[in-house]
Amino acid sequence: MNYATIKKTDVANGPGVRVSLFVSGCRHACKGCFNSEAWDFAYGEPFDDDTLEEILIALEPDYIEGFSVLGGEPFEPENRETVLNVIRAVKDKHPDMSIWCYSGFTFEQLKDTNVSKDILALIDVLVDGKFVEAKKNLRLKFRGSENQRLIDVKKTLASGEIQLLKI
């Protein structure tokens, strides 16, 4: 997997100050995407053990509230295994840290595939759904278009029904 960038003090992609990993590769090609350069799977740098260590170190300061994974598309088949390993490493080192993941896929599309199911079991919030330019709304918190949902994954998995995050 390649990654586009790591933001070590991100305040736009979840509550508080977060570390955010932007993976490369996305087939959704949403019109008006803010990160279209990351559609290319070869964009950016190869993700390796040093990259993972950089993320884990960036998460250490006490002002960091969480970790977010965006894209590109974290749930593309080419990215899933590495994303799962990164999230596992973050959970191992920071078990109480909030983890958010952004995807153009919906929860319903992801919940039945093995690796995606494993990722969902480890994250706290899934921001799901493609960006739809006609539904763009700059007043929304942590998402770009009105069709996208902030799903409380733990509550959703426990209840079997989509539970939206209350913010």
Image (tube, helix red, strand yellow):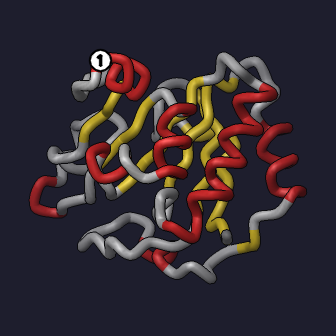
Q: Is residue 156 above or below residue 83?
A: above
Q: In this view, does 69 lie above or below 73?
A: above
Provide residue 9's location: percent of width, then percent of height.
65, 39
Q: Picture quarter containing residue 51?
A: bottom right
Closer to us: 5 or 160: 160
Closer to us: 11 or 21: 21
Residue that mark 1 sits on: 159
Q: Which residue is rendered at x = 47% and y = 40% of the image?
A: 13
| Location of the N terminus (image quadrant) | bottom right
Provide residue 31's location: percent of width, then percent of height.
24, 73
Q: Picture quarter containing residue 133?
A: bottom left
Q: For mark 1, give the secondary structure.
A: helix
Provide residue 80's location: percent of width, then percent of height.
57, 58
Provide residue 68's location: percent of width, then percent of height.
56, 41
Q: Which residue is rendered at x = 71% and y = 20% of the image?
A: 95
Q: Picture quarter containing residue 19?
A: top right
Q: What residue type is labelled 1?
A: Ser
Q: Is residue 106 left or right of residue 61?
A: left
The 10 Å Cα crowd at callout 1, few under 14, some 14 to 19, many 20 or more, is few
Count of number-bearing discs: 1
Q: Is residue 52 left or right of residue 74?
A: right
Closer to us: 61 or 70: 70
Q: Is residue 75 left or right of residue 56?
A: left
| Location of the C terminus (image quadrant) | top left
Q: Which residue is rendered at x = 81% and y = 39% of the image?
A: 56
Closer to us: 85 or 144: 85
